[in-house]
Image (tube, helix red, strand yellow):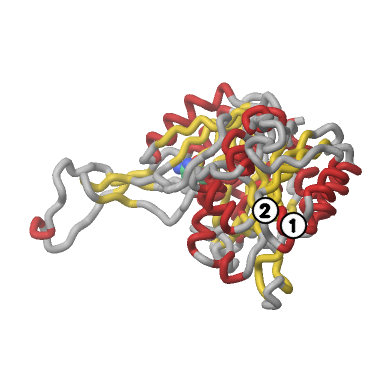
Amino acid sequence: MLKDKKIILGITGSIAAYKAAYLIRGLIRKGAGVQVVITPSGKEFITPVTLSALSRRPVISEFFSNRDGSWNSHVDLGLWADAMLIAPATASTIGKIANGIADTMLATTYLSCKAPVFIAPAMDLDMFAHPATQQNLERLRSFGNYIIEPAEGQLASHLEGKGRMEEPDRIIGILEEFFAAQHTLQKKKILITAGPTYEKIDPVRFIGNYSSGKMGFALASACARRGAEVTLVTGTVSLSAAHPAIKRIDVESAEEMYEAAVSAFPDVDAAILCAAVADYRPEAISTEKIKRESAKDMTLHLTPNKDIAATLGAMKRKGQVVAGFALETNDELAQAGEKLKRKNLDFIVLNSLREPGAGFRVDTNRISIIDNRGEVQHFPLKDKRDAASDIIHKLETLLT
Ligand code: C5P
């Protein structure tokens, strides 16, 4: 998978810089070409001689060579690469690249890089846990960069905790998986619904739910990364979809989501209906803010919304795949199976509200996938991004 892949390896000033030597050796053995870009402080930890011998290329550190004035073009480098890996990434470099501070060759190369970027932090546990670092990492994630979470263990400070750079073999494994998955949904068009719907009561109030949209957005990026063209119809969320192949349509109510989904569906190969759609909406929306003084008790009359999943299930033509979600509190498998049939879905993803760490607002999910042949797969608790890969894997088997 890494054969002939061109990889920029960014190295920064951390004790873990010695692991970069293993990274280069591993990547070269797999047939990749590696161009090292190191920060000035990185050179305090590992010598360019070691790195250039292993990578078989001169190491780049400065903007130009002091010897002959020749210029290192970060723009050309950024265009050359199939991937950029920053390992180890210090808090300082993470802070710089998250905020566009381009005062090292490595940071300018990052800003010029068109290829996917992987970042493997390495630092003391308190530095890693600091909100400044966490916010910077979140920012990098929102740019579509991949953060390779550090492992727990003994740190250079002799403290134990989260901050150790992930081991080189595992990092290389992540790159291999990335390249292997890159084209599995090439030329496929996928519709995803995500987030909550808001059903207006009056100009300032609505009926909503706790859906954060995280699962749907994770699915959208995972599909886009695999080469799909994604239409993401989303309710109100505070997330950004950072991939050029994601066309985002913002809606508020179930009716708006229905219109957007039904009009996009004929043109797609698959639909994943992840949104938490309100089953009911107020029959009448007050044009003025309802005043407390207007009545002692208050009754809202609700009317049912259309079921998007069932509508698309009924519209489905041969070859199209429709997948839904089920969030159940009791008798989960049977309820989900019944929903799958009723809505004519190809598979349904079940998450139970009873599972700690699964469901609304959290970053993790514990899912089971039930398909229309009655096959059931159970998965352990995972980050929603990893759960998205399991769901897409199921989709891939049905699309091919
Ligand atoms: O029936 P229930 O709401 O539990 O079904 C959940 C599944 O149906 C989810 O995939 C959800 O996105 C979808 N759904 C929908 N339109 C609705 C209600 C649910 O697409 N009005």
Q: Which mark is residue 215?
A: none
Q: Is residue 334 left or right of residue 246?
A: right
- Secondary structure at badge 1 equals helix
Q: Residue at x 74, y 31 (%)?
A: 183
Q: Residue at x 53, y 49 (%)?
A: 96
Q: Which mark is residue 17?
A: 1
- Comparing 251 with 313, the one in front is 251
Q: Earlier in the sequence, mark 1 or mark 2?
A: 2
Point out residue 159 in the picture as x, y percentages from the top left corner: 67, 77
Whether residue 370 is visible, yes or no, is no
Q: Residue at x 39, y 45 (%)?
A: 236
Around disc 1, counting alpha carbons within 10 Å, would you say few (fewer than 14), some (14 to 19), or many (20 or more)?
A: many
Query: In the orientation shown, which residue stands out farthest toward the left?
Result: 293
Q: Which mark is residue 12?
A: 2
Point out residue 169 in the picture as x, y percentages from the top left corner: 83, 54
- Please identify the quadrant where the C terminus is shown: top right
Query: In the orientation shown, which residue stands out farthest toward the top?
Result: 267
Mark 1 touching mark 2, by CB under 8 A?
yes
How many numbered marks does the figure carry?
2
- Please identify the quadrant where the N terminus is shown: top right
- Secondary structure at badge 2 equals loop
Around disc 2, counting alpha carbons within 10 Å, would you say few (fewer than 14), some (14 to 19), or many (20 or more)?
A: many
